[in-house]
Image (tube, grey):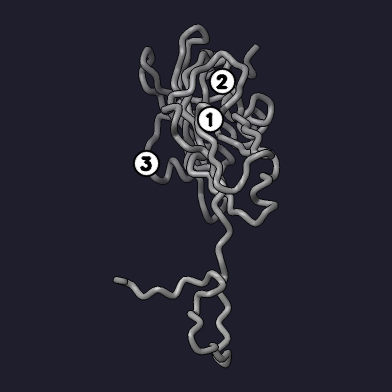
Amino acid sequence: MSTVLQAKERKEFRHSALKKIRDDGNIPAVIYGARVNSKPVFVSSADLTKTLRAVGRNGVISLDVDGSKQDVVLTDFQEDCFKKGILHVDFLAVDKSSKINVDVRLVLVGEAAGVKDGGVLQQPVHQLSITSTPDNIPQQIEVDITNLLVGETLSVADILYQGSFTINHEEGEVIASILPPRQEVEINAGEQQEEGHPDNEEGRETTPIGE
């Protein structure tokens, strides 16, 4: 059963009207979808926070607009970087039996063995596009990197998951890798080199460019 969030239709669009909505503790929003006409609304900021805590970032919400209910998912929001508040949200109207495309957070779990050995973890992908019915959208997709060694990579094909959804990425797309540790070379300006012994005798690369 979907969590109900109360909303009211917006009929004033001037800047002063939007400011009043926000000053009153509400957030301007819009409902859109393939089978519905876009409708501007506003919701209580406190109620939205409670609802998202209850259903999660990708959960289905029953949006009650002046007595008319519509199942929606939150697809996007604009944040005020200075006040750390939400300025606007987008709700996609959904049919629970129809599949939709959404972005889900990718979370790397555990401390990689390669990081313990001094390697550097890189995560080029932080979100995954998936196709799923609204009720089967995961809150996040977790990947265990505990056994990942220096020089190794994980790709989309390595993701082990249980769920009724499809990942919309190429199987070979890299999602995590461990780079070798950077070699810090300390140079002692006062060190004397013995005649006939090259500077890179112990593995330091000193070959000039072009040779």
Q: Residues within 10 Å of mark 2 (few under 14, many from 20)?
A: many
Query: Is 115 placed left or right of 98 in the picture?
Result: right
Name which residue lies at 61% across and 31% down. 48
- Label placed on residue 104: 1
Nearest-to-viewer mark from 3 and 1: 1
Look at the picture and state if 43 lies above or below 34: below
The answer to whether residue 41 of the structure is visible from this angle is no
> Percent position (x, y) of residue 104?
53, 30
Q: Is residue 65 above or below residue 122?
A: above
Which residue is nearer to you in this view: 91 or 46?
A: 91
The type of residue carrying mark 3 is: Arg
Q: Element type at marker 1?
A: strand
Label 2 belongs to which residue? 137
Q: Earlier in the sequence, mark 3 or mark 1?
A: 3
| Residue closest to the far left | 210
Residue displayed at 47% across by 42% down: 78
In the image, is residue 18 above or below residue 121? above
- Describe the element under mark 3 as helix, strand or loop: loop
The foreground one among 206 and 4 is: 206
How far apart are the alpha carbons under marks 1 and 2? 8 Å
Total marks in image: 3
The residue located at (53%, 13%) in the rendering is: 69
- Give the position of the C terminus as an image quadrant: bottom left
Q: Nearer the viewer, mark 2 or mark 3?
A: 2
Q: Residues within 10 Å of mark 3 (few under 14, many from 20)?
A: few
Which residue position is annotated with label 3? 14
Q: Are marks 1 and 2 in contact (CB under 8 Å)?
A: yes
Choose top left, top right, bottom left or bottom right for residue 154.
top right
**Looking at the picture, which amino acid does disc 2 mark?**
Ile
